[in-house]
């Protein structure tokens, strides 16, 4: 059980990294990774919303949609729930935790329609269908790992971009082009983790 | 029929519950807006420079509205903004006029570069290269990071060093943050003697790299009658509060790195 959890958690960070291996959530990856502290703040918010979203959508899918043969409504229902949830969290934070709201506030609306959040809630359900031992707890661990993986990718890339600031880049490559090139190189480096998790936890 | 109706009702139901929940939440947990803070923010210049020590104009306005901050901390707004805010809050406010000053006189007339630099034209980049490109490791490199940071066009690079026009300086401290050598700091806008050197090396070492650098000889300390000058780390400093602008240290300085600052003329050498 514990071994399975560790394996799921590590796999979500390294081999199934949502940004660098599954290419979900590229928008914040390119948009908010200019500075280390904003990248960290954004990833904290994404991790928080991912876990919360899975905690709510998993029971709804398993106990409401799936038994009624409504699995095809998954996407639209999940979007609805995640959007409402994020709005609700924002209201609660604003009222009761102003410092946290000031730290996460600008990122929360950005996350509402983030594909990494929607993707993780749907992909854990897909895993649960092919593997009966993959239940609610496993889904939450996987989601948390996905959030941490998002953070790892963001922080690494923010470091790369801070270095890029001081480089003499050819004029035609300045701005987004060099960012995309370096993003692809970071993604390639993460391919090196393939197969490492299965052999690590045995 | 059920196959169509049930999904419609389900999705509409979820939407309705979520919508109602949000509506109720926004009423129950509404945060009252601070009208006072909004009014104060309108009076501030909106430069978000952080010279007041808060996270920006809105942060300062909120602190003012709560009574946690003093009016008059806003340098770009100056006396005008301080007076307007003081009136709104019902307190008297005064602001001390100050200007940023480059504590170095190392133009090409007095010192040289130790290398021919062809890298990125930025002080931050050049400072990472063997402690900077000038032969004096404390001195102004004249690549203009402060000039680019200045919103008010007060800084010019002239003969390899930066100089700040006090009449244009609004005291926002953007240049202070931009200088990798930490050469820029604030002085009150009044007549006073200022030491235009930041070299903390021993006299002989300073003498090798710059013919105008402070060698810490202490002559200025001896002639000062009001105890405003002291020498620490082979480097003189003048306390502007004690300085009476008598000009004796300026005359006594064998290196001519103490100058009289009148607060009006541009500091271009």
Image (cartoon, coloured by chain):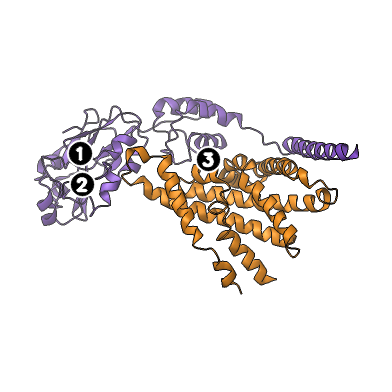
**Dot 2: what SS?**
loop
Asked if one can make out residue A1 in the rendered structure from this viewpoint, the answer is yes
In the rendered view, tell whether residue B249 sits above or below residue B151. below
Q: What residue is drawn where x is 50% and y is 38%?
A: B69
The chain coloured orange is A
Residue B68 circle label: 3
Residue B139 circle label: 2
> In the displayed structure, does residue B27 sit left or right of residue B207?
right
**Residue B254: x %, y % from top left:** 8, 45
* Same-chain check, marks 3 and 2: yes
Q: What residue is drawn where x is 62% and y is 44%?
A: A115
**Residue for badge 1:** B161
Q: Chain of mark 3?
A: B
Asked whether disc 2 touches disc 1, contact meaning CB atoms under 8 Å apart, the reply is: yes
Disc 2 and disc 1: Cα gap in Å?
9 Å
* Same-chain check, marks 2 and 1: yes
**Residue B1: x %, y % from top left:** 91, 36
Asked if one can make out residue B187 in the rendered structure from this viewpoint, the answer is no
């Amino acid at each position: 059980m514990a071994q399975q959890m560790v394996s799921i958690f590590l796999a979500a960070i390294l081999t199934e990294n949502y940004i660098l291996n599954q290419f979900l959530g590229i928008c914040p990856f390119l948009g908010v990774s200019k500075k280390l502290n904003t990248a960290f703040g954004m990833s904290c918010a994404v991790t928080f919303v991912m876990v919360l979203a899975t905690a709510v959508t998993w029971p709804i899918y398993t106990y409401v949609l799936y038994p009624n043969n409504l699995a095809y409504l998954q996407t639209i229902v999940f979007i609805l729930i995640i959007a409402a949830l994020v709005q609700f969290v924002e209201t609660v934070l604003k009222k009761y935790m102003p410092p946290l709201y000031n730290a996460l506030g600008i990122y929360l609306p950005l996350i509402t329609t983030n594909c990494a959040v929607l993707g993780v809630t749907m992909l854990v359900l897909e895993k649960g269908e092919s593997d009966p031992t993959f239940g609610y707890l496993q889904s939450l661990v996987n989601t948390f790992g996905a959030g941490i993986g998002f953070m790892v990718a963001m922080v690494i890339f923010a470091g790369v971009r801070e270095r890029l600031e001081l480089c003499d880049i050819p004029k035609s490559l300045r701005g987004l082009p060099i960012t995309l090139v370096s993003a692809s190189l970071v993604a390639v480096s993460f391919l090196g983790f393939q197969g490492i998790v299965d052999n690590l936890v045995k | 029929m059920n196959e169509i109706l049930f999904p419609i009702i389900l999705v509409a139901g979820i939407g309705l519950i979520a919508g109602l929940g949000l509506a109720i939440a926004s009423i129950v947990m509404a945060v009252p807006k601070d009208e006072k803070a909004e009014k104060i923010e309108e009076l501030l210049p909106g430069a978000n420079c952080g010279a007041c020590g808060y996270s920006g104009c809105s942060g300062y306005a909120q602190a003012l509205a709560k009574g946690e901050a003093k009016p008059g901390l806003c340098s770009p707004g100056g006396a005008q903004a301080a007076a307007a805010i003081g009136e709104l809050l019902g307190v008297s406010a005064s602001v001390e006029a100050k200007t940023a000053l480059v504590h170095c006189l190392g133009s090409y007339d007095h010192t040289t570069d130790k290398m021919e630099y062809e890298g990125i034209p930025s002080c931050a980049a050049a400072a990472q290269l063997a402690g900077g490109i000038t032969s004096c490791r404390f001195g102004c490199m004249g690549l203009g990071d402060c000039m680019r940071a200045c919103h008010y066009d007060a800084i010019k690079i002239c003969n390899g060093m930066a100089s700040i026009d006090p009449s244009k300086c609004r005291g926002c401290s953007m240049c202070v943050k931009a200088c990798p050598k930490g050469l820029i700091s604030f002085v009150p806008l009044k007549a006073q003697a200022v030491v235009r050197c930041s070299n903390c090396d021993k006299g002989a070492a300073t003498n090798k790299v710059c013919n105008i650098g402070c060698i810490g000889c202490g002559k200025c300390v001896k002639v000062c009658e009001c105890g405003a000058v002291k020498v620490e780390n082979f480097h003189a400093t003048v306390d502007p509060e004690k300085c009476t602008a008598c000009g004796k240290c300026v005359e006594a300085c064998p290196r001519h790195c103490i100058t009289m600052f009148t607060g009006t003329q541009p500091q271009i050498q």
